Amino acid sequence: MICRSRTAVAPLERLKILLQVQNPHSIKYSGTIQGLKYIWRTEGFRGLFKGNGTNCARIVPNSAVKFFSYEQASSGILWLYRRQTGREDAQLTPVLRLGAGACAGIIAMSATYPMDMVRGRITVQTEKSPYQYRGMFHALGMVYREEGFRALYKGWLPSVIGVIPYVGLNFAVYESLKDWLVKSKAYMCEDDPDLGVVTKLACGGCCRNCGPDCSLPT
């Protein structure tokens, strides 16, 4: 499902990156429609999806590490919080969930960052680029051989700074909304101890709108 959704918006994702990195003295992409037409005309249909394979390969381990890290960070933070307050029934506050989500985002970003870095290079690659990467593994090997291990983590710090509010707010808003709905028994029957699928989707939609707005500059 994640790969399908990423593939559906891959042309827009590639155009976004090209708009961000293009030379201001040599404008090739001046808008969404014009940019997509230009890619189609100069690189063909495959050009619209350049870098998408690497993005799909990256998103699966990234999501797995992120959710696993969040569960572990939440358990650890909750344990410390209960010891500090002396309340065995204490639950995570929104701020603590934000911290757990930020930890998860940092770990997941760090674990899969080389794949994200080469995805960016493949995405902006043209026929005139000094290096011609044939795919994710070829790009990883070429960067490592030509530039060394540290090159695989170029741009890591700005990415981590951006992912802290993005992932942190996603988890904090999602978990807090779920707790509030369960306690208030909104949109659910009195005898239903859990939220329905539609309600969970609504919570997920709300949290997904919060993170990108705060991390957009990065």
Image: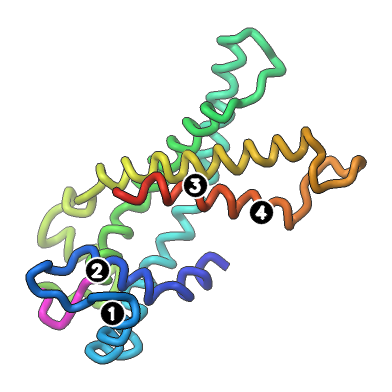
At 57% from the left and 37% from the top, the residue drawn is 71
Query: Counting other residues with Cα less than 10 Å from the Cα at mark 4, is it few (<14), some (14-19), or many (20 or more)?
Result: some
What amino acid is labelled 1 in the image? Answer: Gly
For the residues labelled 1 and 2, the Cα–Cα distance comes to: 8 Å
At 10% from the left and 62% from the top, the residue drawn is 146
CB atoms of marks 4 and 1 within 8 Å: no
Numbered mark located on residue 35 in the image = 1
Give the magenta part as a residue range.
124-129
Can you identify the residue that label 3 sits on? Answer: 210
For the residues labelled 4 and 3, the Cα–Cα distance comes to: 13 Å
CB atoms of marks 1 and 2 within 8 Å: yes
| Pointer 2 or 4: first along the chain | 2
Which residue is more in the foreground, 210 or 46?
A: 210
Which residue is more in the foreground, 50 or 38?
A: 38
For the residues labelled 2 and 4, the Cα–Cα distance comes to: 31 Å
Query: Counting other residues with Cα less than 10 Å from the Cα at mark 3, is it few (<14), some (14-19), or many (20 or more)?
Result: some
Q: How is the image coloured?
A: rainbow
Can you identify the residue that label 2 sits on? Answer: 19
Look at the image and tell me in which quarter the N terminus lies.
bottom right
* Main secondary structure found in the magenta portion: loop
Q: Position of residue 194 (x, y in %)?
A: 80, 44
| Pointer 4 or 3: first along the chain | 4
Local secondary structure at mark 2: helix
Local secondary structure at mark 3: helix
